[in-house]
Amino acid sequence: MSILACDPTYSHRLCPARLTSKVAAVAVMVFVFSTCAMIGRAPDDPELDADIPAIVEQDVAAIPVEPPVIPEEDPVPDVYESISLYVLSGDPEAAIAAYRAAELEDPDDPATRVLLGNLMVAAGALDDAARLFDSVIESDPDNIDAMFARALLAGHFGNRALQEQLLMTVVAVDPENARGHAAIGEMLLQQRRLDRAAEAFQKSATIDPENVVAHVGLGNVQLRRERYQEAKSSFTRAIEIEPDSPFVYVDRSRALVRLYELDAAHRDLDRAIDLEPDFAWNYVDRGRLRAEMGQFDDSIEDFDRAIESLPDVFLLYVYRARVLDRVGRRAAAIDDFETALAMNPEYYPALAPLGTLYYIENRWSEAAQAFRDAYRHNRSEHTFGLLTALSLGRTDDGIAAARRYMREIVNDMPRDSLEYHLGRAIVESGYDAIATRRINDERDPFRKARMTFYLAAYYDLIERTRLAQTLYLEVERSNYPGLIETRLAVERLREFRRD
């Protein structure tokens, strides 16, 4: 399985930490800079100097010297300047402290309180921010900024009904509110209501062609619809508007991967990492892409970096384990799979690859347990039952252990399946002739290759070595390199050749 086999539209920009920080930063900076722009600004009008008479040199002595008047400083511009600097430096707590320490002319003004709420969001005080926005809305029911910010928090807290209610109110109060329509699109996209999401994003982009969220949203709708070229175009438009936004490059890389423009996708992820080097998920995306491109050592480096920052995310160990296995570092791969399963014992997709590694390393009891657990999670994949029995047959209890286990499960297999006949061969001496005939009659070459491996492994187990080798060679020559069965056959043949 490709390490990139996942939902192509998932974007780490939608994770709660990134979403709240982005929203807060944008809201705070828009408010702060617009406020600073309105306070203490002198008009740039050349006509203001037109009536000032020229002062000739001889008149200077006649001008009486008076002490200069030092104007009383207006503290308000300094307050907003301090807040904006703290926000820019990534210190929202200091921005809140500056806000609270300031003697603002009208601290109860709704716009000022919305500023404080957005600072709280940036600082991670989400509950306090929600209460503040609620109080602003109660006193000023048509306050779009408060409703918009509160809607985003409602979405973060999982209150979809409140989120939808507030956003719909925003666009009802102001039908031309581009960010409101874009936020509705994001909400609908997460609900997989693609048609309505596309309409909302298109409405936002029509109102404000420079709205990045609208173009990114359209791109993600197109990704889900598998319209990858259109998605690429939407993301490219977003990058033209906001070339320093890392998450847009990440999103475009997903479209490029689906178009198999892997080098271009790699460049986009490089750019995203250059712009945001401390965001670990970008290394995850690039690590997976590098694995797909065969750049295994570089891929491992990316996963190393991601795991340093996110040591509690079990899936990262699975990703790295797969790449470590590809480069022959089996012991390290086993360690990573074991770590992932210790963190999440129910992540059954890791069990079969771990069992395969145990099998290759002749760790038979552990292989049997891994395949037994995999079969418990996926009762339709009866080959896991066969692998469990074959692994048990290599333990100290030998073929008796394999037969005991197979008697427990063989009747759960469909009677007309090749797995059933192979299971009967393990349980009943002499039944292998029937299993062999059934496999020889199989017309699907893919399925025939898989089942031939299990027959070979059974003969290997009962020490009919020459016949086992012949069958292993048939599996190898079938040339299905992605199969567990092919890999195990090839590894066993290597052992025979070494001997």
Image (tube, rainbow, N blue to C red):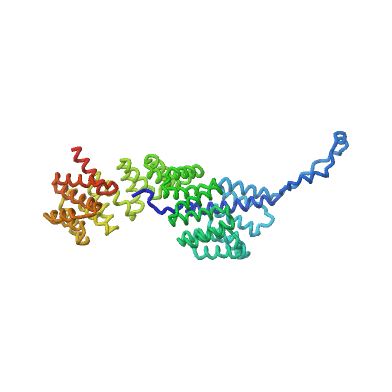
Q: Is residue 186 left or right of residue 427?
A: right
108 vs 181, left or right, is: right
> Would you place residue 58 above or below residue 318 in this image?
above
Q: Residue at the spot x=36%, y=51% of the render?
A: 343
Q: Position of residue 456 (x, y in %)?
A: 18, 48
Considering depth in this image, is 69 or 205 the residue closer to the camera?
A: 205
Q: Quadrant of residue 265?
A: top left
Q: In this view, does 379 lie to the left or right of 197?
A: left
The percent coordinates of residue 409 (x first, y second) are 21, 59
The residue most toward the left is 430
In this figure, what is the number of numbered marks? Answer: 0
Quarter of the picture containing the C terminus is top left
Percent across and percent down for residue 68 are 79, 41
Q: In this view, does 235 lie above or below 63?
A: below
- Nearest the viewer among 265 and 110 is 265
Q: Quadrant of residue 261?
A: top left
Residue 378, position as x, y percentages in the image: 29, 58
